[in-house]
Image: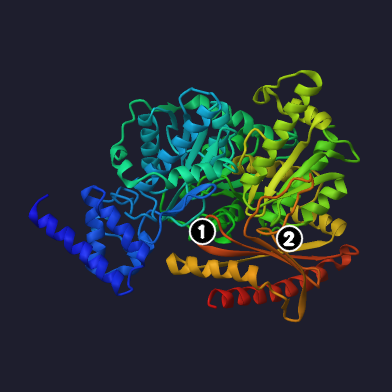
């Protein structure tokens, strides 16, 4: 090393240590920065650290290095572009604004954390196969969305995997998360990864891990993978930072066709599209959705108009504040186009096309944005109704048919399931838990048929109709699954929420409602009159960086040590701590422990609180309900419930913020 470079290196280390001694840098940040500078980083990476230190941007270094980016139970997600972007990282940006390099840091999504995650995942899968006396080379499928560095991270992970001795498949271009889930099973791979940060802001990216069942990893694999990732030392990373794609296999048209054939089966009554002409405005919000959603709708016979300004892939998501179909603003251009051309329906998917949002026509012709809870409830009732008509479920219902939802999804679905005579399974937050339940039902069916009839099933070879028939007789027929955050899944060919299939499902529902001479809001009101009025609210409290993480921990810890007792004179009548209590689902299966709290109030309202697994925030879900005696009083009930819900929301939020600062 040249004397000048050595002097600069020492000067940077001295500055780092001085900042630590002065309390400007956290001890963990000092330790991690020193380790990274000593690890033989590429010149651009060490130069970036030197630049931040020279500026005295200690808050930036803290956020980048106070910890290692956590590889959680579903993977990892974080910033790939720093708040303070260095010249070494920015370099000559690409045509869509992507910097030359991702932001350096142990707590950032970059080449180092991607390679580390890939090595840990490979070592776990290799060991898992060996313990099962399966000695084929570990096989992975990797998909990516349109975000900054997504293609680069995908190729880097595939290169690392193949250099370690595995077989890696990647797609020729951005593809959706549900297609990755399906492809893992279709290719009989041992695991999968999607490079995506879903609907997060443009500066973020992520690494989402799947196992051989096509679902996001859960116990026992989640803990095993986390341990392997955490055990990968820095010195093991540098050998994989240069990409070698010579042995990586690229998936092309046959992979797309196989997924589309399965996604098309989301429609229960394809004839409704011929009987009712449905016009749709769809936007992929610059993401992957157009690759599959538009062909699915067009092939079904739906007239689809896309939003021209949002069709092209763009990691900046320049036409929206956030590429999140939960937000009205993200659908504003689509709504404007639908208003202009008189379309029946507006739908949108997020960047990796696992979530779907929609706006529908009311009786007065205005477009009304629906919540994820409302869309899920409508689809649940519709699919139960139509499956009964198809003979897959008896008219009176069956304990062998199930809706699956998360605890934080509207209890209106519990009422719908009870009315239809089917069981409703509640799971922890996150679609991986719905997928895990599907895995349980698959294994139970295979075990039952093997024990009773000596029949060894190739489950993936079964048609949807055959699966329904066998489950209805010997297992549990999965009718529909949903979570409040705009995630829906029609069947178990895919093991994650599917925005592409959701668009087809919801278009079918809208055509059916149109055939009945109703509007979608009127169909929803039918459910309210039958089951009572349900309204939900969400509180998101964001806390960024190291100090923010500490505030979120304080809220979670004080809920456990000092549970709330009342809000504005309304007493708490029940407090459930999912991290400490034993709670079981409708099948009697114990729910895994998690920092989730469920609070019931004396006025019949309730709410759940949890730290987000994907964003730096604390999240609360508020649930309101009131009986309805008839259509005439529904409007007044809605107004009254809204007032009380807003009051409860304000009280819960104020209490949480006070706990964060305590």
Regarding mark 2 in the picture, which secondary structure is present there?
loop
Name which residue lies at 23% across and 47% down: 40
Q: What is the count of numbered marks?
A: 2
Q: Quadrant of the C terminus?
A: bottom right
Q: Is residue 4 visible?
A: yes
Q: Is residue 540 above or below residue 210?
A: below
Query: Distance of mark 1 from mark 2, alpha carbons?
Result: 38 Å
Q: Of 159 and 302, which appears nearest the observer? A: 159
Name which residue lies at 60% across and 73% down: 656
Q: Please provide percent x and percent y for residue 568.
A: 72, 81
Q: Which mark is residue 364?
A: 2
Q: Is residue 337 left or right of residue 95?
A: right
Q: Report the residue marked by disc 1.
A: 615
Mark 1 closeness class: few <14, some 14–19, many ≥20 residues within 10 Å: some
Name which residue lies at 70% across and 37% down: 440
**Disc 1 or disc 2, which is closer to the eye?**
1
Q: Which mark is residue 174?
A: none
Regarding mark 1 in the picture, which secondary structure is present there?
loop
């Amino acid at each position: 090393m040249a004397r000048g470079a050595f002097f600069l290196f020492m000067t940077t280390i001295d500055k780092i240590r001085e900042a630590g001694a002065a309390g400007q840098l956290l001890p963990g940040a000092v330790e991690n920065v020193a380790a990274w500078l000593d690890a033989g980083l590429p010149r651009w990476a060490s130069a970036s650290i030197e630049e931040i230190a020279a500026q005295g941007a200690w808050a930036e270094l803290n956020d980048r290095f106070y910890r290692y980016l956590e590889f959680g139970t579903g993977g990892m997600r974080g910033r790939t572009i720093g708040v303070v972007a260095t010249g070494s990282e920015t370099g000559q940006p690409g045509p869509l604004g992507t910097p030359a390099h991702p932001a350096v840091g142990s707590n950032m999504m970059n080449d180092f954390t991607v390679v580390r995650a890939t090595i840990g995942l490979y070592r776990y899968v290799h060991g898992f196969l060996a313990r099962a006396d399966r000695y084929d080379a570990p096989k992975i499928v990797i998909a990516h969305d349109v975000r900054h560095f997504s293609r680069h991270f995908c190729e880097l992970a595939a290169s690392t995997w193949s250099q370690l001795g595995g077989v890696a498949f990647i797609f020729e271009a951005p593809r959706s998360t549900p297609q990755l889930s399906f492809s893992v099973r279709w290719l009989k791979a041992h695991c999968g990864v999607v490079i995506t940060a879903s609907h997060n802001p443009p500066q973020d990216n992520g690494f989402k891990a799947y196992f051989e069942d096509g679902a996001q990893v859960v116990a026992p694999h989640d803990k095993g993978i986390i341990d392997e990732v955490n055990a990968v030392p820095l010195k093991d990373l540098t050998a994989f930072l240069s990409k070698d794609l010579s042995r990586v296999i690229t998936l092309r048209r046959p992979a797309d066709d196989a997924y589309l054939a399965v996604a098309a089966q989301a429609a229960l009554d394809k004839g409704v599209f011929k009987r009712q002409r449905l016009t749709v405005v769809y936007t992929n919000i610059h993401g992957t959705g157009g690759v599959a959603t538009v062909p699915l709708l067009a092939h079904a016979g739906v007239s689809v108009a896309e939003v021209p300004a949002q069709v092209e892939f763009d990691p900046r998501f320049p036409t929206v504040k956030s590429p999140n179909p939960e937000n009205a603003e993200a659908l504003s251009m689509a709504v404007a186009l639908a208003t202009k051309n008189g379309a029946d329906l507006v739908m949108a998917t997020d960047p990796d096309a696992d979530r779907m949002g929609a706006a529908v026509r009311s009786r007065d012709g205005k477009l009304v944005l629906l919540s994820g809870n409302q869309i899920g409830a409508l689809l649940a009732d519709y699919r139960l109704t139509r499956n009964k008509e198809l003979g897959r479920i008896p008219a009176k219902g069956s304990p062998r048919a199930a809706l699956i939802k998360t605890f934080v999804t509207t209890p209106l679905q519990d009422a719908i399931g009870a009315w239809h005579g089917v069981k409703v399974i509640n799971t922890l937050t996150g679609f991986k838990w719905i997928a895990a339940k599907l895995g349980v039902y698959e294994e139970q069916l295979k075990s039952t048929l093997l024990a009773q009839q000596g029949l060894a099933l190739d489950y993936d070879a079964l048609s949807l109709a055959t699966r329904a028939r066998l489950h209805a007789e010997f297992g549990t027929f999965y009718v529909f699954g949903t979570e409040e955050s705009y995630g829906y899944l029609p069947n178990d060919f895919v093991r994650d929420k599917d925005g592409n299939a959701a668009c087809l499902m919801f278009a079918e529902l809208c055509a059916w409602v149109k055939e009945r001479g109703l509007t979608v809001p009127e169909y929803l009101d039918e459910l309210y009159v039958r089951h009572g009025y349900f309204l939900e609210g969400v509180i998101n409290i964001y806390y960024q960086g190291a100090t923010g993480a500490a505030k979120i921990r304080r809220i979670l810890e004080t809920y456990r040590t000092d549970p709330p007792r009342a809000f504005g004179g309304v007493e708490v009548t029940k407090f459930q701590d999912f991290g400490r209590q034993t709670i079981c689902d409708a099948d009697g299966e114990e729910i895994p422990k998690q920092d989730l709290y469920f609070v019931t109030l004396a006025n019949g309202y309730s709410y759940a609180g949890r730290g987000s697994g994907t964003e730096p925030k604390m999240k609360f879900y508020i649930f309101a309900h009131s009986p309805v005696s008839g259509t005439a009083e529904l409007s007044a009930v809605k107004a009254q419930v809204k007032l009380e819900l807003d009051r409860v929301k304000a009280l819960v939020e104020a209490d949480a913020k006070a706990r964060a600062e305590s």
